[in-house]
Image (tube, rainbow, N blue to C red):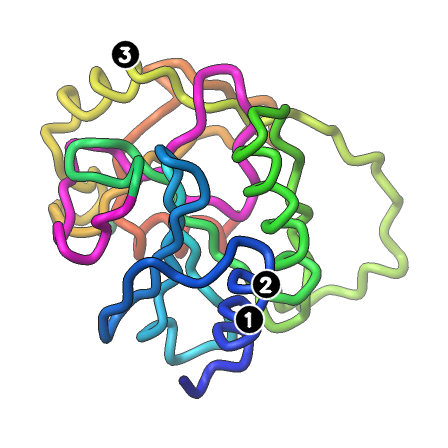
Amino acid sequence: MKNILITKAVDVFNKEFGGHSRKTVKVLAWEIRHDLGSVIQIDQPNREQGVYIWLPYPPDGQSIPEIALEYPGEAGRHSNTYASPGLGRGLPALKLFVHSETELNDSIAFIKAFRDYLPLPEIKQENTESSFPSLVDQSQMPIIEARVERREAIPRLIQREVWQRDGGHCVECGTKEKLCFDHIVPFSRGGNNTIRNLQLLCERCNLSKGNRI
Ligand SMILES: [Zn+2]
């Protein structure tokens, strides 16, 4: 493990949730509740500092963190990689992309609330220079009060309809790999969970869109 944040995440998970229940060359898995597993990828990302944490998709009405990618259940995945409670084939999932220790701590709080059936807290995305390079001098820009919009879990029925409408592939590049739900108008800009505002994008197209906004 070259990635320091992955090592840190594994340490914190072991401390907070007991030893891992499963280990492969790619992942470590924890059983946090009988129906709530969590998986840390230990083989990637390898190009940048960060850690991927998988969780079952939260129940309807719960908040979805800004740093989460939302994976449709229909996308399917390698069964041995995600053989954890709540993360089986055919079930939607969340992947948290954690970039910093603060985000890691917030993610732990999120998972504990998930475990204890509490309202799920927000995970603040740290606007580090590395993830959001800014080419303009923001010191002269007027301060606009950030609109706090709560990003809610996409109801399963809507997930299925979006999957079917988009034919199970990325609407930008056509791939069927690593598909996730994308809000055409982001929640932070007033978007919502309607079928019209959702589309399937692969992870790559999704992240490159994020960088354009
Ligand atoms: Zn794509």
Most frequent secondary structure within the magenta stretch: loop
Q: Indicate the secondary structure of the residue bearing disc 2.
A: helix
Corner quadrant of residue 171:
top left
Residue 179 image-quadrant placement:
top left
- The residue that disc 2 covers is 15
In reply to whether residue 136 is colored magenta, the answer given is no
Q: Amino acid at mark 2?
A: Lys
Instruction: Name the residue: 52% across, 53% down.
Output: 17
Q: Residue at position x 47%, y 81% from top?
A: 3
Between the residue at mark 2 and the residue at mark 3, the CA separation in whole angstroms equals 37 Å
Q: Which residue is mark 1?
A: 11
Residue at left offset 66%, top offset 37%: 122
Identify residue for label 3. 157
- Nearer-the-camera pick, 191 or 42: 42
Q: Amino acid at mark 3?
A: Leu
Q: In this picture, which residue range is highlighted in magenta?
A: 57-84
Q: Is residue 78 shown in magenta?
A: yes
Q: Is residue 186 left or right of residue 35?
A: right
Question: Residue 125 at what x, y percent from top left?
Answer: 65, 51
Q: Residue at x 45, y 16 (%)?
A: 60
Q: Where is 4 relative to 154, above or below?
A: below
Q: Quick check: 148 left or right of 174?
A: right
Query: Is 196 on the left or on the right of 123, as rendered?
Result: left
User: In the image shown, does 26 or 149 lie closer to the viewer?
Assistant: 26
First in sequence, mark 2 or 3: give its number. Answer: 2
Residue type indicated by callout 1 = Asp
* Residue labelled 1 has its Cβ within 8 Å of some atom of ligand 1: no
Q: Residues within 10 Å of mark 2 (few under 14, many from 20)?
A: few
Please say if the residues under marks 2 and 1 sit with CB atoms less than 8 Å apart. Answer: yes
Task: Check the picture and name the quadrant holding the N terminus.
Answer: bottom left
